[in-house]
Amino acid sequence: MGPGVHSPKHRVHDAVEWAMVKGGWVPAVLGTFSTVAASVLLATIGDLSKTDQIARFWVGVTLSALSAFLFLTLDWWRRKTDISRGAEVAQYSLTLSDTIQPMAEAIAAMPAQDAAHRKRTVVKVAALAASSLQLMFQAVPSLRVVVYEFNKKNDVLDVTYNVGRADKPRPFKQGDNGRGDAAFKMINSQEEPLFVEDVTQGTTPGWKGAGKIYKTFISAPIKSSEAAFGMLTIDSPASGSLSKNDKGIVLVLATLLAIAMAQRDKR
C-alpha cells in the first residue's frame, strides 16, 4: 500500500477518533438529551396495564441505556487515547457490557413486581452502581462510594449503601450551616454532578473541611424531573485523583438509580 493511502480499517479508526476527540461534544450532547428524555418519560408513566404506557416505559429504559453507552464510550475512548493503559481500557469495556445491562434489566423488571420486591431491586441496583464505580476507579487511592437517600422527613441524607474505604460515611443534615446545607442545595438546585478537587482549599461554599479523611469528591444528585431521592458520591483522600472528566460516569449511574427509586415509590 503506497504512502498516504489508508486501508478501510484505518479510515474507520480515523473517523471514530475524529468523532470522539474533535467532535466529542456530539455524543456528550446526545447523551445528555437522552438522559433528560428518559427521566421525563419514566417519571410521567401512568397505568402500566395500558399499551401506550408500557411503550413509554420501554422507550425510557432504552434511552437510559443509550445515555449510559454514550457517556461511558466517550469516557473510555478519551482514557484509551490519553492514558493508553490496557488494564484500565479493559475495565471500562467490562463496565459497558457487565454493569449497565444488569442494571437496565433489573429496572425493566420492576413494573411487574410488588412493593417489597421493588425495594429489594433498588438495593440490587444501588449495589451494582457502587461496585461498578469501585471497579472503574480502582486506581484511585482509598476510594469510597456512597449512596445516600432522604429520610421520611426529607431533612437528612442517610447512608443506604457504601463500599470501599473502611471509615464510615456520615449522614448529611439540613440546617447545619455547613456540609449538610451544601449537599441539599446541590441536590435541589443543579442537574450536573459537583466536583471538588480539594475540600481544604475552600473554593466551594459549604464544603471547606467537610471531609475529615477525604480531600476530593464527586457527588451527583439522584433525581428525576419530578422528585429528588438522594445523592451518589465518590471520594478519596488523594486530591487530584479525580477530575471533572469523571463526572459523566457518576451522573449516568445516578440517573439509573433515580429511575429505579421512582419505580419503587410508585403506588
Image: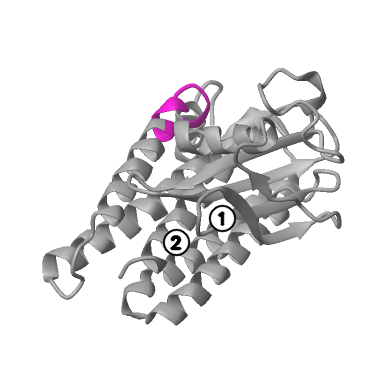
**Three-letter amino acid code at the position of disc 2:** Met
Examine the structure image and report whether residue 26 is included in the region drawn in magenta: yes
Residue 47 sits above or below residue 154 on the image: below
Mark 2 lies on residue: 261
| Residue 80 visible at all | no
Label 1 secondary element: strand
Screen quadrant of the C terminus: bottom left
Instruction: Estimate the spatial distance between the alpha carbons at disc 2 and disc 1, rounded to whole Å.
Output: 10 Å
Q: Where does residue 75 sit, x and y in percent of width and height?
A: 57, 38
Screen quadrant of the N terminus: top right
**Three-letter amino acid code at the position of disc 1:** Glu
- Residue 149 is tagged as 1
The chief SS type of the magenta part is helix
Foreground residue, 126 or 247?
126
Q: Quadrant of residue 179?
A: top right
Q: Is residue 73 left or right of residue 214?
A: left
Residue at the location (64% across, 30% down)?
A: 195
Foreground residue, 76 or 159?
159
Q: Where does residue 191 sit, x and y in percent of width and height?
A: 45, 35
Foreground residue, 208 or 146?
208
Nearer to us: label 2 or label 1: 1
- Residue 191 is tagged as none
Q: Which range is magenta?
A: 20-28
Residue at the location (34% across, 59% down)?
A: 61
Q: Is residue 266 left or right of residue 200?
A: left
Could you tell me if the residues under marks 2 and 1 are in contact, i.e. CB atoms within 8 Å? yes
